[in-house]
Image (spheres, grey):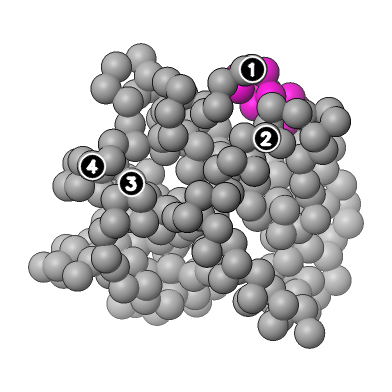
Amino acid sequence: MLKLHGALLSPFVRKVRVVLAEKQVPYELVPANPFEKPPAFLTLSPLGRIPALEDEGGRSLADSSVIAEYVEERFPEPPLFPRDPYERARTRWFDEYADGGMGPSLTGKVFFQRVISAKLMKNAPDERIVAGGLAEVPTYFAYLERELGNEEFLVAGRFTLADISVMSQLVNLAHAEVTVDATVYPALARWYARVTERPTVAPLIAQDRGFLAKISG
Ligand SMILES: N[C@@H](CCC(=O)N[C@@H](CS)C(=O)NCC(=O)O)C(=O)O
């Protein structure tokens, strides 16, 4: 069975878990703390980041996008990348927009301070960093609102990795009390509800909430 090394709350781990769930691929979630980097974990993930995947033969891969494409190629059904080359590239673009843009600009600031730092590490959040992240939210949300327009999904009119990657960052923002205001971003709010209600996504959010309730006590 595949082994996914990671932890609850990580947007990158959630992304891979949703990919595996959509394709109904069984896997074992092996707990890995990204703030401790034992040598054994560094052999799986040389940058010391979660997630890392180990295949049935013990071969490893790191990085959620690399893992998602590997899973797509090994388990093609249902496809999470469109066939058309431009639409495939657009899917990768939204994956990058989420991981390389929303991740460091929003989640890494607001979620990290309000949840990881305040609730898990029991340190006071740095409000200047939080404010910096919050100031960037409208730019990201307005872009996504425009890109969605009247469409149900971000790319090719169907659920793809683009939706998974962007949703995954937004879930972390929601955990940090940053939600999508439906009066300002109606398309994004509808899309977020549609994607997070999926049976492959909703249970993971519930699992996160259970964990958050425990660490908030
Ligand atoms: N590009 C990577 C990012 C992974 C990442 O940054 N994971 C965080 C946890 S959410 C981590 O492991 N941080 C620890 C570190 O950077 O040392 C991916 O997509 O997997």
Disc 1/disc 4 C-alpha distance (Å): 28 Å
- Residue type at mark 2? Arg
Q: Is mark 2 within 8 Å of ligand 1?
A: no
- Residue at x-position 29% and y-position 17%: 84
Which quadrant of the figure has residue 28? Answer: bottom left
Query: Residue 8's x, y, as percent?
Result: 53, 69
Please give the residue where the numbered disc 1 appears in the rendered image: 149
Circle on res. 190: 2
Query: Residue 203's x, y, as percent?
Result: 52, 64
- Is residue 70 something that shows in the picture? no
Circle on res. 68: 3
Whether 142 is among the magenta residues is yes
In the picture, the quarter occupied by the N terminus is bottom left
- Which residues are the magenta region? 139-148
Query: Residue 149's x, y, as percent?
Result: 64, 17
Please name whichever residue, 30 or 204, is drawn nearer the observer in this view of the structure. Answer: 204
State which tag comes first along the sequence, 4 or 3. Answer: 3
In the picture, the quarter occupied by the C terminus is bottom right
State which tag comes first along the sequence, 2 or 4. Answer: 4
Disc 2/disc 4 C-alpha distance (Å): 26 Å
Disc 2/disc 3 C-alpha distance (Å): 25 Å
Q: Is mark 1 within 8 Å of ligand 1?
A: no
Q: Is residue 148 above or below residue 109?
A: above
With 36 as the anchor, is 68 left or right in this view?
left
- Is residue 83 something that shows in the picture? yes
Disc 4/disc 3 C-alpha distance (Å): 13 Å
Q: Is residue 74 above or below residue 160?
A: below
Give the SS element for disc 3.
helix
Please give the residue where the numbered disc 4 appears in the rendered image: 77
- What is the residue that sits farthest to the left in this orientation? 57
